Amino acid sequence: MFQTLEHFMKSWEFEAGATQRLLNNLTDESLEQEITLQNWSLGRIAWHTVTAIRIITSNTNITFEAPTKDYPVPTSAQFIADSYHKVCKAFVQALQTQWTDSTMNESIDFLGQQILNGSLLMFLIQHQCHHRGQMTVLMRQAGLVVPGIYGPSKEEWTKFGMEAPQM
């Protein structure tokens, strides 16, 4: 749980930056990549990461402009990446102007249970991490380069003069 806005902002800056790097590497063609017809496509997951920021925070008193419907999925990877950037900027600005550290300890209803806003913000980050993992698998299947998140990706090892670990 986050107890201060500053602590959240530092974590969000890194995590949102990692998500943005993934989204920036998508192509229009890759948005159709899926594991099975019963699972979400790469584009659906990517667009969901954009809309989920507002959806997850909708029961709080924070207001900012962001799409809230994750279907239909846009067909432009650039539009998804640009939308994520805009939503993140609006979200951060709203937090900085509408919340204080004491807001982190306010309780809200989330998915039928009472949680603190600081816990909701932790869930938001975890939700983004969860979907980034899904996207990286689909990106590899689509033949895209996956940027490093918590260290260099397989494709980046050689950039650092290292050999990729053998499986």
Image: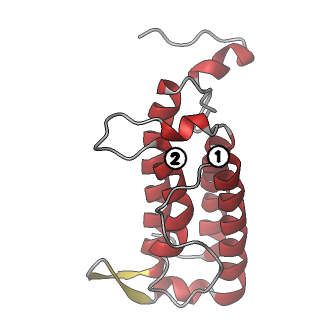
- Coordinates of residue 129 in the picture (x, y in percent): 48, 50
Q: Is residue 88 left or right of residue 1?
A: right
* Label 1 with label 2: CB-CB less than 8 Å: yes
Q: Nearer the viewer, residue 37 or 164?
A: 37
Q: Is residue 24 above or below residue 142?
A: below
Q: Is residue 54 above or below residue 49?
A: below
Q: Which quarter of the rendering shows the C terminus?
A: top left
Color scheme of the displayed model: secondary structure
Residue type at mark 1 is Ala
Q: Nearer the viewer, residue 82 or 131?
A: 82
Residue type at mark 2 is Gly
- Coordinates of residue 105 in the picture (x, y in percent): 47, 85
Disc sitting over residue 94 in the figure: none
The residue under the point 26% across, 81% down is 112
Q: Residues within 10 Å of mark 2 (few under 14, many from 20)?
A: many
Q: Nearer the viewer, residue 88 or 99?
A: 88
Q: Is residue 77 above or below residue 115?
A: above
Q: Is residue 37 left or right of residue 17?
A: left
- Coordinates of residue 71 in the picture (x, y in percent): 46, 62
Which residue position is annotated with label 1?
A: 77
Which residue position is annotated with label 2?
A: 43
- Coordinates of residue 131 in the picture (x, y in percent): 45, 49
Q: Secondary structure at mark 2?
A: helix
Q: Is residue 50 left or right of residue 48?
A: right
Query: Mark 1 or mark 2: which comes first in sequence?
Result: 2
Q: Residues within 10 Å of mark 1 (few under 14, many from 20)?
A: many
The residue under the point 46% across, 8% down is 166
Q: Distance from label 1 to label 2 (Cα)?
A: 8 Å
Q: Is residue 95 above or below residue 35?
A: below
Quadrant of the rendered image containing residue 90: bottom right
Q: Secondary structure at mark 1?
A: helix
The residue under the point 49% across, 55% down is 128
